[in-house]
Image (cartoon, rainbow, N blue to C red):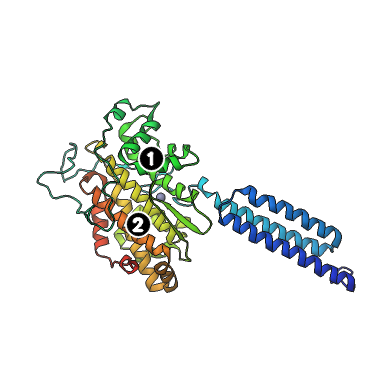
């Protein structure tokens, strides 16, 4: 074979030099692209040096005159690098795709097209109960849900987050098919300003709209779909602000949580550790199975944050629901508190390295803050009987669990 391996001494050293130059350019380019992506720079910043480097390599190759085999190897290297850069760029622009988070319809998360209503069929508040509007503080009846922590005295104070008494009468009276979107943002502005802030952060404003199916003209339906719209928007806004391996959670205008993503394990691994009554809920199949189950702990926290938003919205508009209707506002958040505790327990027992990484990393502090925030949201929602379905059961399960979050407090 004349061409392999190269035989001439001069040609060999020329080939070696060519290889060194080409590999140095490729290596430098990879580092450059990686840094640019990590800092969230626009695609042009990455593609421009890529084009320049491509030209440089072409010049080197034209002088070097490598063999057909070498050209083939170089082509494979280029395709691999270009593929990696494209894939990373794709990862950086994932906000356009909601699927990585919520793969399919869950109890709190209808698919944008399927539009499964969040609202559940009427469930009587008491056996044989009527469909009369549920008073916000039932006189003489024990509250259905005991506050986990009083809003103002817990470690996280959310007492000012929701303004459930803010007047929205005029918005309700004027609500209709032509102004439903502006009405929803206005309701958030008055009742849950952090939710309104999140919606305004969306690059693609129509993302908010797609979660309204029945609510484009039906006030009660809009009130149940609003929580999902804010929930999904919070996922996207966090991703828009993400920088490479730093995960960002959108909490509100004045609060943002970010942390480097540690190496953790698939959340599907906690499925077998859940009590049967939790495993049966569609939250478990939606989030712990299939593609969704392959996500790590940072995405458990992403849902914890998103479901906290869902519950804040549900609390803000709880009195707007018809008296005989109940929605699952508390369920999703309680399910994710159970998932968080279970994940941390499985980490401690079966994945000590991941547990150490969570415990010692900024993600540990974020977990504590999100957990306390979620507890405060639950306490705030306690007077409203109509925003929970399986919440009593989930609360009981949570109370019976070991408090793994306590180990993260420092
Ligand atoms: Zn979600």
Q: Is residue 224 left or right of residue 67?
A: left
Q: Is residue 59 visible?
A: yes
Which residue has dot 2 on it? 370
Q: Is residue 78 left or right of residue 348?
A: right
Q: Is residue 280 visible?
A: no
How far from the left and from the top, in percent, is residue 86?
63, 53
Kindly indicate the quadrant of the structure image that contains residue 339.
bottom left
How far from the left and from the top, in percent, is residue 317?
28, 39
**Image point 63% across, 55% down: which residue?**
85
The quarter of the rendered structure image containing the N terminus is bottom right
How far from the left and from the top, in percent, is residue 280?
33, 56
Q: CA distance from mark 1 to mark 2?
A: 20 Å
Disc 1 secondary structure class = helix
**Image point 48% across, 47% down: which residue?**
98
Q: Nearer the viewer, residue 7 or 407?
A: 407
Name above or below for residue 191 compared with residue 81: above
Q: Which mark is residue 129?
A: none
Say few, some or many: other residues with alpha carbon within 10 Å of mark 2 (under 14 / 14 to 19 / 20 or more).
many
Name above or below for residue 398 compared with residue 176: below
Name above or below for residue 234 compared with residue 222: below
How far from the left and from the top, in percent, is residue 308?
34, 50
Q: Nearer the viewer, residue 6 or 121?
A: 6
Disc 2 secondary structure class = helix
- Going by the picture, which residue comes out furthest to the front? 254
- Going by the picture, which residue comes out furthest to the left? 140
Q: Is residue 229 left or right of residue 62?
A: left
Query: First in sequence: mark 1 or mark 2?
Result: 1
Name above or below for residue 383 compared with residue 372: above
Say few, some or many: other residues with alpha carbon within 10 Å of mark 1 (under 14 / 14 to 19 / 20 or more).
many
Q: Which mark is residue 196?
A: 1
């Amino acid at each position: 074979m004349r061409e392999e391996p190269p035989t001439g001494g001069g040609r060999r050293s020329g080939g070696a030099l060519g290889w060194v130059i080409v590999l140095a350019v490729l290596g430098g380019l990879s580092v450059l692209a990686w840094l640019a992506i990590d800092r969230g720079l626009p695609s042009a910043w990455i593609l421009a040096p890529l084009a320049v480097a491509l030209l440089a390599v072409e010049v080197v190759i034209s002088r070097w005159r490598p063999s057909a085999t070498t050209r083939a190897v170089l082509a494979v290297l280029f395709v691999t690098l270009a593929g990696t850069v494209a894939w990373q760029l794709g990862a950086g622009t994932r906000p356009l795709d909601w699927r990585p988070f919520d793969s399919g319809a869950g109890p709190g998360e209808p698919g944008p097209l399927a539009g499964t209503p969040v609202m559940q069929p009427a469930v009587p508040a008491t056996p044989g109960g009527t469909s009369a509007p549920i008073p916000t503080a039932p006189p003489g009846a024990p509250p259905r849900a005991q506050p986990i922590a009083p809003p103002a005295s817990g470690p996280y104070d959310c007492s000012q987050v929701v303004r459930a008494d803010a007047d929205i009468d005029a918005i309700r009276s004027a609500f209709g098919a032509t102004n439903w979107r502006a009405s929803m943002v206005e309701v958030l502005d008055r009742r849950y300003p952090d939710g309104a802030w999140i919606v305004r952060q969306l690059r693609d404003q129509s993302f908010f709209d797609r979660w309204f199916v029945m609510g484009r003209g039906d006030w009660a339906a809009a009130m149940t779909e609003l929580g999902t719209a804010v929930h999904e928007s919070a996922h996207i806004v966090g991703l828009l602000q993400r920088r490479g391996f730093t995960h960002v959670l959108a909490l509100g205008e004045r609060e943002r949580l970010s942390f480097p993503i540690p190496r953790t394990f698939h959340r599907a691994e906690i499925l077998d550790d859940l009590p049967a009554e939790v495993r049966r809920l569609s939250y478990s199949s939606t989030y712990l199975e299939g593609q969704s189950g392959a996500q790590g702990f940072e995405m458990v926290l992403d849902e914890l944050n998103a479901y906290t938003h869902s519950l804040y919205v549900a609390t803000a508009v709880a009195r707007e629901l018809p008296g005989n209707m109940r929605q699952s506002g508390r369920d999703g958040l309680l399910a994710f508190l159970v998932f968080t505790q279970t994940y941390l327990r499985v980490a401690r027992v079966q994945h000590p390295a991941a547990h150490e990484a969570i415990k010692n990393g900024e993600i540990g502090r974020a977990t504590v803050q999100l957990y306390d925030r979620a507890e405060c949201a639950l306490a705030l929602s306690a007077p409203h009987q109509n925003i929970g379905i399986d919440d009593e059961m989930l609360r009981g399960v949570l109370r019976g669990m070991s408090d793994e979050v306590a180990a993260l407090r420092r």
